[in-house]
Image (cartoon, rainbow, N blue to C red):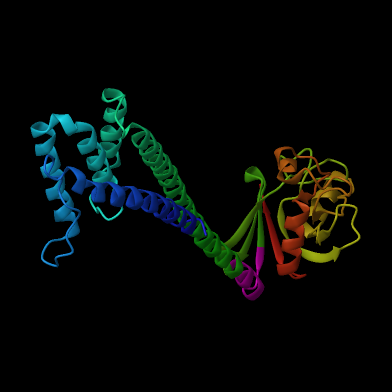
Amino acid sequence: MITGKPFHCKNTILSSLACCIISIALLFFSACTNNAATLPIPSPPTSNQNVSQQDAFAASLIQYQKLLQQKPKFADRILFEMGIAYSHPKNTGKDYQKATACFQRIIDDFPESKYRDDSQMMLFQVSNVLMKDQLIDRQRQQADAYRRQIKEQESQITNLRGELDNLRQKIFTYSTIPIDKILIEKHKRRLTLLSQGVAIKTYEVALGKNPVGPKEQQGDGKTPEGLYFIESRNRLSKYHLSLRLSYPNQKDTMRSQSLGVSPGGDIMIHGLKNGHPDIGTFHATLDWTDGCIAVTNEEIEEIAQIVPDGTPVEIQP
């Protein structure tokens, strides 16, 4: 729709100007007979098939230039008819600027000329066409800019479709490739899902408030270190959703017994505390749990969907 309007507008303007110019041109070309003896004005373009209209206009304008030098007495009439020829709608080499110069010269140099009023009218018409052409050119440039934007947007859409396909493939991968291990690296604050030793996806995590070293007793704020498995899951957790780990294992129990303390329990991989879901991954900038491993609510939902109970969990220092 954008590209159609300027061309339609231009055709309408040129049609109006053509009617005006043709009427005036016919009037003055026919008037040539009154002064034929003193001023041999060139005839309108021939219809001879061997001579193109452009060649005929060009030849006539050359004769006009000669007459302008030979017959200065008739300069106003010659200039007027030159302006008509330069702006004639059938002149494929029309030059509105030269036409304007002819009409303007009559207005400036021949104040008593009978062609002066008509020159002012023609000057207005030609100037109006020039302004309309400039407007059409701006609209065409704007349309070209819109086309470029559309191409860029189409390219962006293509890229987004590619990304969407990749995401769909990842979803398919998550749903078809079994996760056979979870690796938690405390010093990197990172949880990785593995399948046959290949990392499928990683997550940033937050740990216990006192994360360095293995958990020794209840309430010490440490996250355990060792080999565990997902024992169960709780969708009614006060931390959105939680996967319970098989802590304490035999090694943890023996260590706490040697220290004469309780090893504690309830170690989970869980989401954010209910009522605080909007902080997103910002939670991972601080270790804030009582010894659990925390991810975002969206991430625990994803992990819970693709990791079954019984999956081994290794927690490294």
Is 17 situated left or right of 113 in this image? right
Identify the residue at image location x=63%, y=76%.
176
Nearer-the-camera pick, 83 or 139: 83
Is 133 situated left or right of 272 in this image? left
- Residue 268 image point, x, y percent: 81, 55
Nearer-the-camera pick, 162 or 28: 28
Nearer-the-camera pick, 63 or 231: 63
- Residue 51 image point, x, y percent: 12, 61
The total number of labels drawn is: 0
Nearer-the-camera pick, 46 or 202: 46
- Residue 77 image point, x, y percent: 23, 37
Above or below 89: residue 79: above
Above or below 286: residue 51: below
The span shown in magenta is: 170-181
Identify the residue at image location x=66%, y=65%.
181
**Residue 145 belongs to magenta span:** no
**Residue 173 belongs to magenta span:** yes
Identify the residue at image location x=20%, y=45%.
34
- Residue 233 image point, x, y percent: 84, 64
Q: Is residue 94 visible?
A: no
